[in-house]
Amino acid sequence: MKLIARLRPIQTCTALREIIGPLQSRSFQPDFVPRDPNVKPIRYKYPAAYDPYGPRPPPSDKIVQLAERIAALAPEERRQIGPLLREILRHPTLKPISVEVDVKLEKFDAAAKIKVIKEVRSFTSLGLKEAKDLVEKVPAILKQGVTKEEANEIIEKIKAVGGVAVME
């Protein structure tokens, strides 16, 4: 008797799963109405230029006049507007984005090979054998994805010990 009582909820869940799909059981919600699996979803038509915030009112006459006055200024005066507005409105100044480059070892003096290997080990996480192999297969990329400032420092260090490195 207990076995039959336990099987009935399983049978109703199986029938419900056929209607709403696998892994979904919403029968515990009182307002649930299973949808017909043969019905296609509703396709909404969006305008070509969709603005999620809705239509915006046209600019006021005061704003239009201000824009016309700014457009009539000389180019040198227009360049001064941005920094002055940032200062007055207390907007933070944006730092320039540094470009990532690769540093490539082009060549080195044979007499300075040991110094170049030591210098390569100083700014990479390579061991002695790996650094030696890298230096011996010149031209080779020493470091990838570094900022221009860091690349210049590496190039100067390599140049100081007798090597030639370039940015790519």
Image (cartoon, helix red, strand yellow):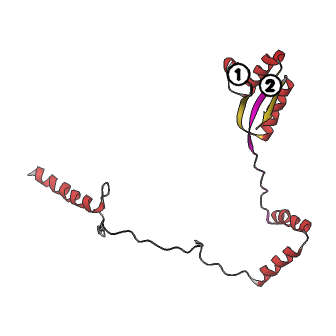
* Residue at 19%, 57% in the rendered image: 9
Farthest residue in the left direction? 1
Over which residues does the magenta segment extend?
89-106
Asked if the residue at tag 1 contacts the one at tag 2, i.e. Cβ–Cβ closer than 8 Å, the answer is no
Local crowd at mark 1 within 10 Å, few (<14), some, or many (≥20)? Answer: many
Q: Secondary structure at mark 1?
A: helix
Tell me where residue 129 appears, x and y as whole percent. 67, 17
Q: Residue at x 21, y 60 (%)?
A: 15
Q: CA distance from mark 2 to mark 1?
A: 15 Å
Q: Residue 131 placed where, x, y %?
A: 70, 21
- Which residue is label 1 attached to? 131
Q: Earlier in the sequence, mark 2 or mark 1?
A: 2
The three-letter amino acid code for the residue at tag 1 is Ala
Residue annotated with mark 2: 107
Name the one closer to the observer, 23 or 39.
39
Residue 58 location, quadrant: bottom right
Q: Nearer the viewer, residue 10 or 140?
A: 140
Residue 21: image location, x then y, percent? 30, 58
